[in-house]
Image: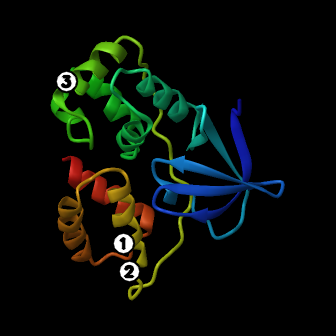
Amino acid sequence: MFEYLNGIVTSVTPQTIVIDVNGVGYLVYVANPYHFERSDQVPQKIYVHQNVTDSSQTLYGFATAADKQLFEQLLNVSGIGAKSALAIMAGNDNQGLITAIQTEDVQFLTKFPGIGKKTARQIILDLQDKLQTQTVSQPTMARPISATDNAQLADALSALQALGFKEKEVAKVGQQLQTTDENLTTDQYLSQGLKLLTK
């Protein structure tokens, strides 16, 4: 089993990254692929969880070991699959998530795609006594954008849909984000979109 991969991220999509390790490209599913997007071709360490079934092998990647541990704890909750766990972690707010679980904040948890009240209560029941304070992972550098280039917003909206948010919700958020005067990176658009969708 892999603990981490150390290499250059060569491709980023709304759901995945490809990391080149000594000439071998590994397809890795991540909560927010644009955290790992860099223009300087500097090697990055991606902590990975490997899921092996009879028909496939899938890698899930994380910026820190703490992120990986939290993902694995979420996977151990009945009713939580990898897609739901990634959607929960896409907010990049580990401490907010942990606080919500420890304070039994069902409303906070049900804002994530695929998480109903029953599943939220199960998360609280299973993890309330197991979670400790963790440091929120920091995003890596993302590419700059120009005032006329809105491909970053389109990428961010695609990533939100890939996480399971409804198309109408994402479109509404897209309209709100278009009114901002700032030149934002894809990562920043995605972070703002997640805040709007889960507030």
- Position of residue 100 relative to residue 129, above or below, is below
Crowdedness near tag 2: few (<14), some (14–19) or many (≥20) residues, C-alpha within 10 Å: some
Specify whether 16 is left or right of 132. Answer: right
Task: State the quadrant of the N terminus.
Answer: top right
Crowdedness near tag 3: few (<14), some (14–19) or many (≥20) residues, C-alpha within 10 Å: few
Q: How is the image coloured?
A: rainbow
- Element type at mark 2: loop
Residue 83 position in % (x across, y down): 41, 41
- Marking on residue 74: none
- Position of residue 122 relative to residue 113, above or below, is above
> What residue appears at the point 60 percent right and 42 percent down from the top-left corner?
59
Does label 2 or label 3 sit earlier along the sequence?
3
Read off the residue under disc 3.
118
Camera sees residue 102: no
Image-quadrant location for residue 77? top left
Q: Amino acid at mark 1?
A: Leu
In 3D space, how far apart are the residues under numbered discs 2 and 3 (Cα atoms)? 39 Å
Residue 127 position in % (x across, y down): 36, 17
- Marking on residue 153: 1
CB of mark 1 within 8 Å of CB of mark 3?
no
In 3D space, how far apart are the residues under numbered discs 1 and 3 (Cα atoms)? 33 Å
Q: Residue furthest bottom?
A: 148
Image-quadrant location for residue 131? top left
CB of mark 2 within 8 Å of CB of mark 1?
yes
Camera sees residue 93: yes
Residue 81 position in % (x across, y down): 40, 33
Q: Amino acid at mark 2?
A: Asn
Read off the residue under disc 2.
150
- Position of residue 156 relative to residue 134, above or below, is below
